[in-house]
Amino acid sequence: MDQTIASGQQRRNPASSTLKMSGELDLAAAPMLQEELEALFTTGAISIFVDLLDATFLDSTALGVLVNALNRCQELGGQLHLIVTDPQILRVLDITGLTDVFSVHSSSDELNPGKEDA
Amino acid sequence: MNAIVDSKRRTTEREVIEISIPSSVDLVVLARFTAATVGARAGFDLDEMDDLRLAVDELSISFGPLDGETCLRFEFLREDDTVTVRCTREPMARLSEVHESVERDVINWEQARELSEQLLNELVDAHGQEVTNGRSASWLRKRHCTSPR
């Protein structure tokens, strides 16, 4: 299954970064997701916005990578935000009790990363 | 009339589909495709098919990282509106090209299994693990539910 990844930093606040993932986030994609998140931490990110609007599947391995990144963000004083509307992915978060642990948003318009972490 | 009879017969018959996947994480998607197809034949709605796809994916995770010496064998059994999936880790008849198992080092398998267990508890009616003839297997059972989720 095809995956595309894009990442970037907020110009107003370099400590906030965005990562866009699409496709099916499974065992095959989890290492790539981990690598991209690691790269963002290396550049100094403490808050990360993971855009899953074009993602269609999330299994326990990819979810585990996101949980580890969340823990790391919180240790650094930041937060990991998920932008997600896919019902199946929301169901995965709900079943695992992580909906309220992550900061979950339905669109990027809901938040203003530059202001929030400035 | 014939169409009605044929349709009825199709939903009550017993079907078994088997697939064997070499040790490549990219190919687990084939098991998910098969799950969706078998689920559709059992009369599952779209949500139930999504649940079955995810549950089958989670079965493969229960074995930890894949290697070049084993394969995953999935057996999909449909009986009426019930799907039973059994996943067995078996030695490859012929060793495949050894791939670097990136996920072996990156994935926290203990954490993944805990999340997997939570997901399977909710997604299917029953699931478990067993060892038969020295081979470990994971299985699940899901029945079409007529009431809304």
Image (cartoon, coloured by chain):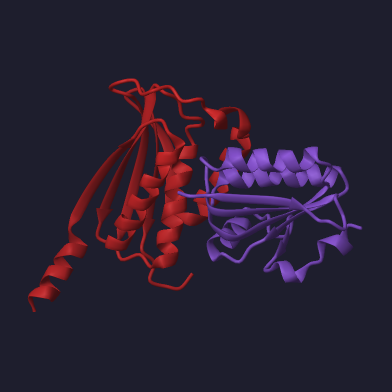
Front-most of residues B100 and A105: B100
The percent coordinates of residue B130 (x first, y second) are: 40, 33
In the orientation shown, which residue stands out farthest toward the left?
B2
Query: What hue does chain A carry in this figure?
Result: purple
Residue B5 appears anywhere in the view: yes
The percent coordinates of residue B70 (x first, y second) are: 38, 25
Front-most of residues B87 and A84: A84
User: Where is B63 relative to A8, above or below?
Assistant: above
Q: Quadrant of residue A89?
A: bottom right
In the orientation shown, which residue stands out farthest toward the bottom?
B1
Q: Residue at x 45, y 42 (%)?
A: B59
The percent coordinates of residue B133 (x first, y second) are: 32, 24
In the orientation shown, which residue stands out farthest toward the front?
A11
Q: Residue at x 14, y 75 (%)?
A: B4
Front-most of residues A57 and B86: A57
Q: Which chain identifier belongs to the red chain?
A: B
Please indicate whether residue A53 sits to the left or right of residue A56 in the image: right
Q: Residue at x 69, y 68 (%)?
A: A107
Q: Residue at x 66, y 58 (%)?
A: A51
The percent coordinates of residue B20 (x first, y second) are: 31, 36
User: Where is A82 relative to B5, above or below?
Assistant: above
Q: Quadrant of residue B147?
A: bottom left
